[in-house]
Image (tube, rainbow, N blue to C red):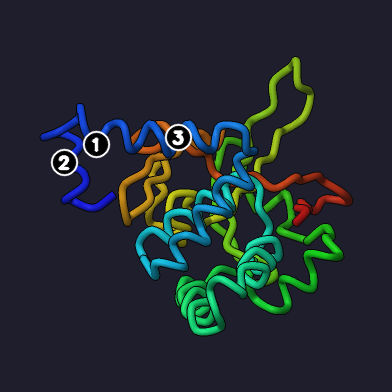
Amino acid sequence: MSDALTYLVKARPDAVGHYFAFLKDCGKHLDPKTRNLISLITKVHAQTERGFRQYLGRALREGCTPMEVLDALLMAFPALGLAKIVWAVDIILAMDLPDFRPEALQAAAEARWHDVMAIGDLAPGATSRVECDGRGLFVHRAASSAAAGADEWRVYDSRCPHQVTNIPHLALQGHTLTCPKHEWVFDVRSGECVAKGTSPLKCWPSKVENGRLLAHW
């Protein structure tokens, strides 16, 4: 939200509040994916880059696939026109989102298990940032307990769910991961956001086979 809108909400909540209540109410019967895709299209129509980036992140967090985002843009062609669709795609390319790369779109139709690392390369209780098949990952190995009987592995996408900032290894301090852009803080043991934001890290399904950690995307 712009500084001007933030000001108006504080200065005239009685007036401006009705507008935001209307926006919230008019989308209450839509599932989150559809609601965010529609909002995304409105930002493209208005060519509001900040809003487009914001709602793209929300749509992806709500489970929209990159192909669904592209389909929504193309389906809106009669209203948007080619120039605005190209404007939106240029922003997506500038954001350098791995899932939007042509090879990733192709691979998404054939999602598979990726060989991340040897389990001996990470001690119980430790976390490491690794690169695997063009994707940045944070891997956490929880120490086993008598009840669990085996170590628990968690494999997270290195991109912050807020604005898909690629979080570097230096952002990791103990069990805390802090995105350098807006300081969203995550607990790598659970993936939950514990400060600033509300959305957790994207966690990929994982398994151990023949001494290797595999992740599925």
Q: Residue at x 75, y 56 (%)?
A: 217
Give the Cα separation between the discs numbered 2 and 3: 18 Å
Q: Residue at x 64, y 30 (%)?
A: 143
Give the Cα separation between the discs numbered 1 and 2: 7 Å
Q: Is residue 168 visible?
A: no
Return the disc, 1 or 3, that comes first in the chain's sequence: 1
Q: Residue at x 35, y 62 (%)?
A: 50
In the visual, does 79 lie left or right of 64? Answer: left
In the visual, does 112 lie left or right of 35? Answer: right
In the visual, does 53 lie left or right of 67? Answer: left
Dot 1: element: helix
Give the Cα separation between the discs numbered 1 and 3: 13 Å
The residue under label 2 is 8
Q: Residue 13: x and y, percent?
A: 20, 30
On residue 16, the disc is 1
Pointer 1 with pointer 2, Cβ within 8 A: yes
Return the disc, 2 or 3, that comes first in the chain's sequence: 2
Q: Residue furthest top?
A: 147
Going by the numbered disc 3, the residue's amino acid type is Lys
The residue under label 3 is 24
